[in-house]
Image: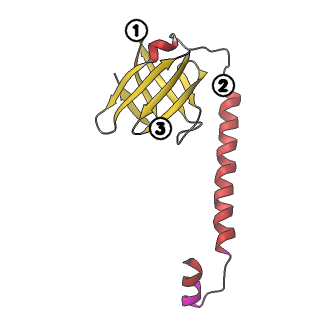
Amino acid sequence: TNSLIDLYCGLKPRDWNAHFRKLVDDEAATKRAALAARDKARDPTAGPSLALAAYAGKYAHPAYGTATVAHAEDKLVVSWSGFTCPLEHFERDRFRVGAGLFEDELAAFAVKDGKATGVTLSGIEFQR
C-alpha cells in the first residue's frame, strides 16, 4: 500500500519491507535489552512470601472479568479471558509468565496480612 501511495504521489520508491522489518527488529532488540536488565537486577534468593497454594484463587476486575490462579503439582497457572499461562517464580511475590501472549511479563501479587489480596497482570489490577 505504501509503495502504491509513493507511486501515485510521484515519490521516489522506497523499500517499505526493509523499513518495517528494521522497526520490528529494533523493537525486539529493545525488549531483549530491557528483559536482560530486569533479570540482572533480580534477587534470585528472594523467595515468595507465601506458600504457592496461598496465591491460588479468583481475582476480579470490574471491566476485565475474573483471573483465576490455580495451584497444582507445585506450580501456578493463571487463566483469564481465554488465556492460560504458566507462572514461574521470579522474585518475592512476582512471577514471570512462562508462555503465551503475556510471555516474559511479570504477574505481581499484592500480599497483606499473610494473604494474597490481588494480582496485577499486563497492567491490570485484579482484586480478591
Count of labels shown?
3
Mark 3–mark 2 distance (CA, rounded to whole Å): 19 Å
Quadrant position of residue 43? top right
Q: Earlier in the sequence, mark 1 or mark 3?
A: 1
What amino acid is at disc 3?
Ser
Task: Check disc 3: other Cα within 10 Å, few if <14, some if 14-19, many if 20+.
Answer: few
Q: Residue, x 54% and y 89% (percent of image)? A: 8
Residues in magenta? 6-15
Mark 1–mark 3 distance (CA, rounded to whole Å): 25 Å
Residue 76: x percent and y percent? 52, 22
Q: Judge from the rendering whether residue 63 lies leftward or rightward of residue 15; answer left or right.
A: left
Q: Earlier in the sequence, mark 1 or mark 2?
A: 2
**Residue beneath label 1, please?**
113
Taking the view exactly as shown, the residue that stands out farthest to the left is: 62
Mark 1–mark 2 distance (CA, rounded to whole Å): 25 Å
Q: Tell which of 52 and 61 is nearer to you.
A: 52
Residue 122's label in the rendered image is: 3
Residue 7 among those drawn in magenta: yes
Task: Check disc 2: other Cα within 10 Å, few if <14, some if 14-19, many if 20+.
Answer: few
What amino acid is at disc 2?
Arg
Q: With respect to residue 116, does 80 lie above or below?
A: below
Q: With respect to residue 2, does 26 lie above or below?
A: above
What amino acid is at disc 1?
Asp
Q: State the SS at label 3.
A: loop
Q: Which of marks 3 and 2 is nearer the N terminus?
A: 2
**Residue beneath label 2, please?**
42
Residue 37: x percent and y percent? 69, 35
Residue 33 among those drawn in magenta: no
Q: State the SS at label 2.
A: loop
Which quadrant of the figure contains the C terminus?
Answer: top left
